[in-house]
Amino acid sequence: MSNERPALLVLADGSVFRGRAFGAPGERAGEVVFNTAMTGYQEIATDPSYAGQIVCMTYPHIGNYGVNPEDHESDRPWIEGMIVRELSPVASNFRSNESLSDWYARTGVIGIEGVDTRRLTRRLRVDGAINGVLSSVDLDEASLLAKAKALPSMAGQDLAAKVTCDAAYQWDEAWPERWCEMPQATDEDDLAPLKVVAMDFGAKRNILRSLVTFGMLPTVVPANTSAADILALEPDGVFLSNGPGDPAAVTYAIDTVRELLGKVPIFGICLGHQILALAAGAKTSKLKFGHRGANHPVREHATACIEITSQNHGFVVEADSIAGTVFEATHTNLNDMTNAGIASDELRAFAVQYHPEAAPGPHDAQHLFRRFRNMIRGAAATAKSS
């Protein structure tokens, strides 16, 4: 077609992938990762946890249901770019406002289609995630290779500081009723909302909606908010959000959470899980190619229940390091047997390495928000009393 624009993806190891550009013209660089979800490309693009990354979608047909503003997880896309096998020429859905390509063009995101995504995913699985440059303006392979080699590693980067909110704000929006059956209160006391402070390391909107739906009113605060300032808000509980980058680099948040432990109930998700573990004395490390998708099986030790979970992280809590803390390992990822959850009844804190708000099961893990509420009201942090 005459309106086709060529594009190049060049990895730091010299691998070259040619395709056709869509979305905005330009050039972007970052860590190249893959996501195995069949749907959710809009939520992926607007999830702040993907800051600094170029995302390869393994499902071959992307964009068929378009884009709508209600499904944004933040106020803009955070990905550096998107790689797809085939971009749908038609966006057909009654909720769609515009096509994926038009949305990317309007918001400055670069896309490339026509790429052999199976070959690229195999490269990332075998050799690990790697930096790359995606461009529709510079089509010189040597030039792009030099730029890719010059990029810093994701390890050691504090990206939470780049995606967090500028100032504190309150959130009061719950799930739309059509999304699923709303949780039912069991007595009058259940109807009283609990005050929660949500530390924003890159929080997704549906996490905040979930807190409200389960009877909590979050005040969202920047990632560098001190423990003293958080406690001054007199919260019933503290929530630690998801986010991008290396958890060990977010030293200020680790110090804050360490100071909060034992003083207020705490629940963490994804990066929040890792920060809670580091605050307790555990260690984290970078995974070879990360966990990104909507079909990761996780086993909860206490109940032996298997949850189908949505995950998006490149770092993990080292399972062996948990034993030396007051926390216990509560969940295991059954794909690679890495840690997927920790809890401490003594400190009234728990966290998981996956996204219960994303609901791919569809509702396998949403009970964790109820567990948080119950823990605030005196129940244990572990499954035995949830």
Image (cartoon, helix red, strand yellow):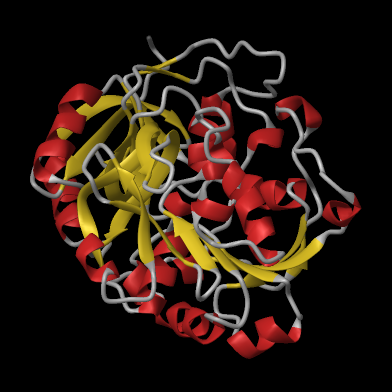
Is any atom of residue 158 visible in this view? Answer: no
Quadrant of the snapshot with the N terminus: top left
Closer to the camera in the image, 15 or 380: 380
Up the image or down, 71 lies above or below 268; here it is above
To which quarter of the image does residue 233 belong? bottom right
Q: In this view, does 201 lie to the left or right of 311?
A: right
Q: Residue furthest front?
A: 384
User: Residue, x 52% and y 52% (percent of image)?
Assistant: 384
Q: In this rendering, does residue 34 appear at all?
A: yes
x and y percentages locating residue 279 in the rendered image: 41, 78
How many numbered marks does the figure carry? Answer: 0
The answer to which of 328 and 283 lies nearer the viewer is 328
Task: Name the residue rendered at 65%, 35% in the picture.
Answer: 71
Residue 166, percent from left and from top: 65, 71
Residue 61 location (% of width, % of height)? 40, 15
**In the image, residue 156 above or below residue 42:** below
Query: Which residue is located at x 22 percent, y 53 percent?
Result: 287
Q: Which residue is drawn at 73% across and 75% down?
A: 235
Give the x, y percent position of residue 5: 36, 25
